[in-house]
Amino acid sequence: MSAPTTTAITTANPLPAPVPRPDPDSTGFWSALNDGRLAVARCTRCRTWQHPPTETCRHCAGPVACEPVSGQGTIYSFIVVRQATVPGHQVPYAVALVELAEQSDIHITGVARVSLDELRVGLPVQADVVAVGNGGQHVVELVAA
């Protein structure tokens, strides 16, 4: 199991990429990313993974805490963005929904740094933690595994 890598976003776009605003439920997820790790909420009682994070488990109402994940998964679905509506990436680019290796129904999203010719459902990918903005915030992007 390889750990997510850390990279900086580079772009020719003059506007900065949007920066996430953590809420109380997602603070653990964003804090882990800012430390260069990918972590997802997991119930401390029934051990079910869940994302996006919530205050309590969706299955048993138990408490949840963020735990590290491998960042490995497969593309479950994707869209290709062809019009620049959000700054930070040059069009065309893809945003992928990835099913993580840890659990079949746990998904994360991110920009897929994969050639559009290679992009397909089922493609193995690895999470890459990248910095956005000047405030030390990080997000997930995806690279072919």
Image (tube, grey):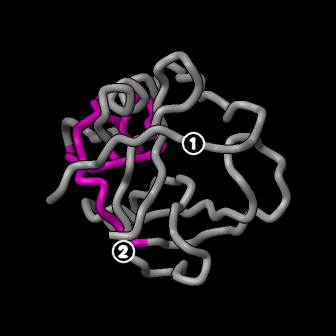
Residue 64 makes an appearance in the image: no
Residue at image mark 1: 10
User: Is 116 above or below relative to 108?
Assistant: below
Q: Secondary structure at mark 1?
A: loop
- Choose between 15 and 97: the one closer to the eye: 15
Q: Provide residue 45's location: percent of width, then percent of height.
A: 19, 38
In percent of the image, x 39 and y 58: which residue is there? 106
Q: Provide residue 115's location: percent of width, then percent of height.
A: 55, 74
- Choose between 67 and 110: the one closer to the eye: 110
The answer to if 49 sits in the magenta stretch is yes
Q: Quadrant of residue 63?
A: top left
User: Is 49 above or below relative to 126?
Assistant: above
Image quadrant containing the C terminus: bottom left
In percent of the image, x 46 and y 45: which residue is there? 140
Under mark 1, the amino acid is Thr
CA distance for labels 1 and 2: 24 Å
Q: Secondary structure at mark 2?
A: strand
User: N-terminal of the two: label 1 or label 2?
Assistant: 1
Residue 48 makes an appearance in the image: yes
Can you tell which of label 1 and label 2 is closer to the viewer?
1
Residue at image mark 2: 124
User: Which contiguous range is marked in magenta?
Assistant: 46-74
In percent of the image, x 21 and y 49: which residue is there? 3
